[in-house]
Image: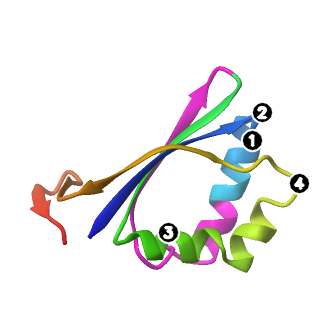
Amino acid sequence: MAFAILSEIPDVTQEQYETVVRKVNEAGSPVGALFHAGGPIEGGYRIVEVWESPVAAEEFYGSELVRQATAGLPQPKVLMTWPVYGLDDRSGWRQIA
C-alpha cells in the first residue's frame, strides 16, 4: 500500500536541502518514490513524500546514499504518516496500490 510521510528537518537551510536533493537525484530516482515536495518553514524545512510502501521508504532512508548525502545534518523528524490510495501528478488522478 502506498504510504505518505510528513516530516520536518530542523535547522536546515535551503542551500543544505537543495544539496541533499541534488545528490539524491544524481544517483537516480529512489526506488519506490512516487512524490517529494519540500519547502522552508520557520527553523528548518518541511517535507511531504509518497512512497509505494513503508518498506520502500525505510530502505531509502537506511541507505548508504542517504547517510552520505545527509552527513553532518540534522535528521528528519516524522510528524505523521498515512496510507495513500490515490495520487494526482497533473496527469490526472490515479489509484495507487
Q: Residues within 10 Å of mark 4 (few under 14, many from 20)?
A: few
> What residue type is disc 2 on?
Asp
Q: Nearer the viewer, mark 3 or mark 1?
A: 3
> Please, is residue 44 above or below residue 59 in the view?
above
Tag 4 near tag 2, CB within 8 Å = no
Q: Nearer the viewer, mark 3 or mark 2?
A: 3
- Residue corresponding to mark 1: 15
Q: Is residue 39 magenta?
A: yes
Q: Residues within 10 Å of mark 3 (few under 14, many from 20)?
A: many
- In whole angstroms, how far apart are the C-alphas of marks 1 and 2? 12 Å
Sooner in the amino-acid sequence: mark 3 or mark 4? 3
> What residue type is disc 3 on?
Ala
- In the image, 80 versus 19, the foreground residue is 80
- In whole angstroms, how far apart are the C-alphas of marks 3 and 4? 21 Å
- Residue corresponding to mark 2: 11
Which stretch is magenta? 22-42
Q: Secondary structure at mark 2?
A: loop
- Left or right: 93 as drawn, with respect to 59: left
- In whole angstroms, how far apart are the C-alphas of marks 3 and 1? 24 Å
Q: Secondary structure at mark 1?
A: helix
Tag 1 near tag 2, CB within 8 Å = no
- In whole angstroms, how far apart are the C-alphas of marks 4 and 2? 12 Å
> Please, is residue 93 above or below residue 59 in the view?
above
> What residue type is disc 1 on?
Glu
> What residue type is disc 4 on?
Gly
Q: Which mark is residue 57?
A: 3
Q: Is residue 83 magenta?
A: no
Sooner in the amino-acid sequence: mark 4 or mark 1? 1
The picture quadrant where one finds residue 51 is bottom left
Q: Secondary structure at mark 4?
A: loop
